[in-house]
Amino acid sequence: MSFSALLVGIIVVPLVGALLTPIVAGRNGNAAGPWSFGVMSLTSVIALLLLMHVVEVGPFSAYLGGWEPPYGIELRFDEFSASVSVICLLGTLAILFSFKYAAKELPAGRLRYYYTLLLLNLTGMLGFAVTGDLFNLFVFMEILSLSGYALVAVSGKPTAEMAAFKYLIMGAVSSLLVLFGIGLLYSLTGSLNMLDISRRLAGAPKAPAMLALAALAVGFLVKAGIFPVHIWLPDAHAIAPSPVSAMLSGLVVKIGLLGMVRVYQMYYGARVLDLSAFNTVLVWLGAIAIVMGAFFAIFQEDIKMMLAYSTISNVGYIVMGLGLASEYALIGAAVHIFNHAIIKAALFLGAGALIYQTGYRNLTDLRGVGRSMPLTTAAISVGAVSIVGIPPTAGFLCKWYIALGAFEAGQPFFGVVLVFGALFIFVYYIRMVNAFYFQEPVHPEILDATEPPMSMLVPVLVLAALCLVMGVLGRIPLTFIEPAVERLLAPLGG
Amino acid sequence: MLGLLWTNIDYAASVGLFCIGLYCVITKNNLIKKFIGLNIMESAIFAFVVALGVVDGGDAPIMGAGARPPFTNPIPQALILTGIVVAVSTTALALSLIIRIYRQCGTIEADELREME
Amino acid sequence: MKRALTAALLVLLALPLLYAVAQLPPHGSASSPPYTHVSPRYLERGPVEAGAENVVTDVILNYRGFDTNGEVTVIFTALAAVLAVLLGVRKDAGPVAGEPRAMSPVSPVVSFVVRLLAPFVALFAIYVILNGHVSPGGGFQGGAIIGALVIVTTVIVGRSQAEALVPARARRLLQAAAPLTFVCIGIAGLLMFGDYLAFPRVADLAWLRTAWLIAIEMGIGVGGAAIIATIFWTMGDE
């Protein structure tokens, strides 16, 4: 099987799975879960094969319809596209987690459409990661956005529907901004292929090019949840069903950041604009987000709200890394995109297991749960340690690289901000771990709770184990992404 | 400067329409009116992109008997066909959410909903 | 106060936008990048290479067919989303749930005119779908017309009778028809010509290319109509 066919396959397999899910689900929709799990497992195998190929030969392409770019659509798998591995992994585990969780939390008639939407969300993300065509990027972004809005609202509670509506309005405006940026770039270059655009952008008039950059950046950053346009994020991520929260915080937010990386790939290569002012804005926004997200998280009682604000803070890290624009910072930011996905998914799925078993969401109500659900709480603690950034867990190396990048770029102030942010994060996660293990239970029935069913426990433990593994093997993704970052920065000399 | 703007008056009109739509999304209280503002913004962007493809004296890009160059650019039209479908899909989902919110909360005014939370 | 402030901010926002937009390549010029880069090839060789005289159809089904594949997936996502949000809730929950549904009787004039015109509308819709090759039209346009016809018929004759227009057994398959047609033809292209959604380019197989294009158009039309009808019925249930 040729690799270009596999590249198409990674999008088509979950797509066909999603199309057939309502039909395959049977009378009462119970078969939808195992079917989606099977589909995503197959997709994960394809992702692994593509990953191995890009390690061997570097970026490769597939031309759809046989038309060479820019006359046709090109799928291009480069090192940043390797995020398909994380997307498939988290998707498969979230689906596994949903077997018991969704059956309990959702109205019965919706079950099959829940799995359909999950698969469509994953299709959209996979397509976004591997495409080399700008308008194709927009189409896949819309697939994943629409399914995301609906997944937030699927539980049927009024708060969920309002959160979904707020998310929808802000998401739709940001998609329009992206479309505006695409139209401007098309008007300036005549092409929709990202490589081609970066070649042809060099001679374009500056003001429209700057406007296109601003439109695309604002559009993608709203999707990423950066301060000050993060207001849709806490409600949407906290009120959604837990597997959906894991996917939203872990993956969908990262799609916005991956979009920013693609925009950078076009603009750095073209050397049409001096991006230093733009980068400065990003660095400041990132720094504010780090501090503000962590600060608000300290005051949250609801465990999922706390995790949602923590996502805002971590998105700040990545945006700051992108804005610092030095090699270390970009490598750290790119790898943090993957690592944070794993850590945040572990935390959200763990929190979901706690809520499922005990029925409580507030930290005060959950006191003492560490004694009755030791495995789940241990997994959450591992996630907490990782996100603070203590070695040898997954969060440490990326944040270290971003801090080094701040010094490399001659802006040591932001390295200090990063350390401060880590301290804040430390405070609220210590509060959480303290409540679980060391405080007396407020509700005595907490001590009677048991570990969640295997289909929910296994994903949580796997992700927690990965947090440790990615910490120990942390050098590998960093060296893997290095050639892509060098290619990104090359025309600027470094 | 103004001369350039007059040549590109179509684009300027789209920008104006976009800002009107954004104003509606931000300031209107009723959820459906917010959503109509979003539709206005979508129409503005579609008009902008289609206007990119216009050529002076151009015909529709349909070959066959009696077709004479110059032809309008077919690519923006293809892009906006997709864009319109995406806008319709978002409209369907938003209206469903508004229906559910109305059934469960009895109101679709944003300030009343905020107080209920 | 909030309105005045927002209006002032938006006017301030519009100014740099207008400045930038004024410097785009002049509107209508034949030397702008979009008109000189990729489009000339589509306009010159489209009907020969891609198989339809309507170059826009060439672009959406052949050159950039994968975008259209994504787009029919977006419609399907909208259907799944609407069903996921509206299905399965108890009717007696919430403050306004218990209101009696106000049904105004259908005017006999409307009813008569719709019944008279419905077959012609349906015929026109099929004409639009099949004629997308050589005139403005195509799957989406025709599918929207059929969808609108189903909606108007539901208003006239009531839901239970109108549901016969989209047979219940085949309903789920019809809803997925558009993307499934695309994937089937895409895989056929992959197996026969080596690339996903590759259409035959040799003159001998031009009949096959036209057949595939028409199949995709029909798939999009039927799928789009089924989805519009289902979304309308689901919303109407509420």
Image (cartoon, rainbow, N blue to C red):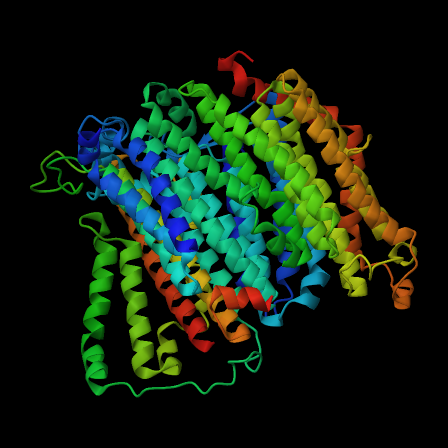
Looking at the image, residue A97 sits to the left or right of residue A35; the answer is: right
Q: Position of residue C146 (x, y in %)?
A: 29, 66
Q: For this rendering, which residue is in front, A173 or A293?
A: A293
**Residue C77 showing in the rendered view:** yes
Q: Is residue A358 left or right of residue C45?
A: right
Image quadrant containing the C terminus of chain B: bottom right
Compared with residue A494, is residue A345 higher up or lower down, i.e. above or below? below
In the rendered image, the vertical position of residue A225 relative to residue A359, given as above or below: above
Tell which residue pokes out farthest to the front in this image. C1
Q: Residue at the spot x=58%, y=31% of the render?
A: A284
The residue lying at 86 percent from left, 58 percent from top is A367
Question: Residue A244's spot in the image, x, y percent?
Answer: 63, 54
In front of the other: A440 or C99: A440
Res. C66 visible in picture = no
Direction left: furthest residue: B66
Q: Position of residue A112 (x, y in %)?
A: 58, 64
In this rendering, is residue A200 above or below C152? above
All told, the count of numbered labels is 0
Q: Is residue A301 left or right of residue C89?
A: right
Quarter of the figure with the N terminus of chain B:
top left
For image coordinates 17% across by 29% down, the residue present is C30
Q: Is residue A95 left or right of residue B43?
A: right
Point out residue A321 in the picture as x, y percentages from the top left corner. 62, 28
Q: Please give the name of the residue rendered at 35% of the width and 48% of the height, measured from the top-left corner.
A: B83
